[in-house]
Image: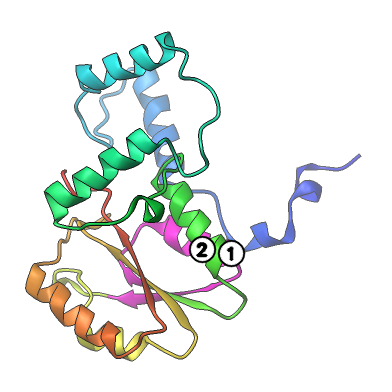
Amino acid sequence: MMDGSDVNADRLAVIAPSMILGLMAQALKLKALGHPVIDLGIGEPDFKTPDHIKKAAYQAIKNDETRYTLVAGTPMLRTAIRNKLKRDNNLDYPLDNITVSGGAKQVIFNAFMASLSQGDEVIVPSPNWPSYLDMVAIADGTPVSVECPQRDRFLLTPERLEAAITPSTRWLVMNSPSTPTGGAYTKPQLVQIAKVLRAHKHVWVLSDDIYEHL
């Protein structure tokens, strides 16, 4: 009879269970025992799901909109995303460049799995969300953490980016506002980062803006 470790793929040896989810489990356990807990583990809003979202989800189920869609998502949803990007970010993308996933983590994982080969490097400013490093590693890439000290407000500087780029660099992960520090880049800071990247056209940018409106 096999024990639990026998069924694990070798690639799982490069990652560890999420400490954040472990903390969440401990917090829930303490709450269930009646202890007062301030939970700073999971990055999610402290407000309830807005009523118009609940109503839209309910109406979709009522209309039997519960079957397979196009892999990229429904045209209506992708159009809404396109309109949001134009309205809020002054970015105009064709629908062919917009895809919908089951969540931010999935789409980041998909990007790394589809693009990384053994030896490819991914630059991740640190402090960072630990899942970035795990997703890179499980996709056979090499995570490169670049320390961003408090004196720089935990933000990546052009000088540190330049020093971290090698011929093997495939991606730069940008997370603004960032987790766990909340650091956010200004437009002038992003312009300076972009100047470095223009000199290294082999480096792609993965911009994780999940906390944009928080």
- Give the mark, 1 or 2, whose residue is nearer the N terminus: 2
User: Which element type, helix, strand or loop, lies under badge 2?
Assistant: helix
Q: Position of residue 112 (x, y in %)?
A: 51, 63
What is the quadrant of the N terminus in the image?
A: top right
Q: Residue furthest right?
A: 1
Q: Position of residue 143 (x, y in %)?
A: 47, 72
Q: Amino acid at mark 1?
A: Ala
Residue at x 16%, y 44% (from the top left corner) = 213
- On the rendered structure, is 32 left or right of 88? right
- On the rendered structure, is 140 left or right of 136? right
Instruction: For marks 1 and 2, give the CA distance.
Output: 6 Å
Residue interval drawn in magenta? 124-147
- On the rendered structure, is 89 left or right of 148? left
Q: Which residue is mark 1?
A: 139
Q: Nearer the viewer, residue 115 or 123?
A: 115
Q: Nearer the viewer, residue 118 or 125?
A: 118
